[in-house]
Image: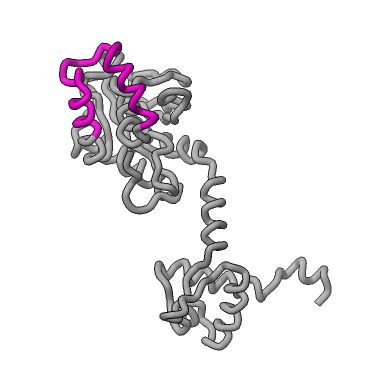
Amino acid sequence: MSEELEGKHGVQSLEIGMGILRAMANGQRSMMLKDIAAAADMPASKAHRYLVSLIRAGLVDQDPMTSRYDLGTFALNLGLVALDRLDRVRLGLSAISELRDEINQTTALAVWGDGGPVVIRWERPRRPITVNVTTGTALDLLMSAAGRVFAAWMPKNIIAPILAEELKHAPLPPALKSKAAVEALLAEIRAQGYAATNGQHKVAGVEAAAAPIFNFKNEITMAVLVVGVQGMLDISPEGKVVQSLKQSAEKLSLRLGAHGEPKQP
């Protein structure tokens, strides 16, 4: 076949090999040869020849004790590189837009900046009375929902000095005046999967709820939040706002490759 025709039609053997890899990826666990062949819709003898080449390339491993096949180290590395190159912010902006449309409340996206969470984008709802959020706003850890989310899941060596400073100087409510009270609050947030201010927001008359977004390392990478006027925003655990918020964050975490339990601080 000429190079021109190959350029138009691709390399069939590569496509077959990718079909085997796709079958293995969909299998969710290591597989026997016969199962791979059946999933890829080809004879076992043909699948075996391709598996030999895929093993040489590092895309497949074979357990010498069980003879089962699984994705190899190079396949794992390719996946991690692809996940790392995902534009997390672009996906986050899409998520808060969809969440705003679903619950008709102000939504925002926050990332960890220099010394704390920073709002990088917000979406205005279609309602007469709203809370506006300024892009670039730096958030306290204990007086904001997003801050509490980051405090709950960020590494302690990063969070501890900031919390200590806020315990000394921030206008905290009486229930949060001790280190033990803060630790109890953060443990509760990790158990519930979200944080809320319930009238304890730094800005009077504002309520907010936030949920964490995790990356493929199961580390917190962003927070999605909902902000509203106090008394007009239902942030009860079983309410539509909180349930939609958590579902949005979980969906985005999955898109970023999160799996299993979040990494604990």
Q: Is residue 112 left or right of residue 146?
A: right
As for residue 184 lying within the magenta part, the answer is yes
Vertical position of residue 15 compared to residue 264: above or below: below
For the point 26% across and 11% down, the residue is 171
- Where does residue 99 sit, x and y in percent of width and height? 37, 37
Residue at 45% x, 37% y is 92
Task: Examine the image and state in which quarter residue 188 appears.
Answer: top left
Q: Name the spot of residue 170 as percent of width and height, x first.
A: 29, 13
* Foreground of the two, 100 or 212: 212
Relative to 154, say whether 199 is above or below.
Answer: above
Left or right of 222: which side holds 171? left
Question: Residue 192 lies in what quarter of the image?
Answer: top left
Quadrant for the N terminus in the image: bottom right
Name, please, the residue furthest toward the left. Answer: 175
Question: Quadrant location of residue 159?
Answer: top left
Q: Is residue 61 above or below residue 65?
A: above
Find the magenta span and give its range. 157-186
User: Residue 208: x percent and y percent?
Assistant: 29, 25
Asked whether 44 or 107 is in front, the reply is 44
What residue is drawn where x is 48% and y is 41%? 91
Looking at the image, how many numbered discs can be counted on the residues?
Answer: 0
Q: Which secondary structure dominates the residues rendered in magenta?
A: helix
Q: Is residue 112 visible?
A: yes
**Residue 105 visible in the shown view:** no
Quadrant of the drawing holding the C terminus:
top left
User: Which colour style is shown?
Assistant: one colour
Residue 241 spot, x, y in % from top left: 27, 35
Q: Is residue 166 magenta?
A: yes
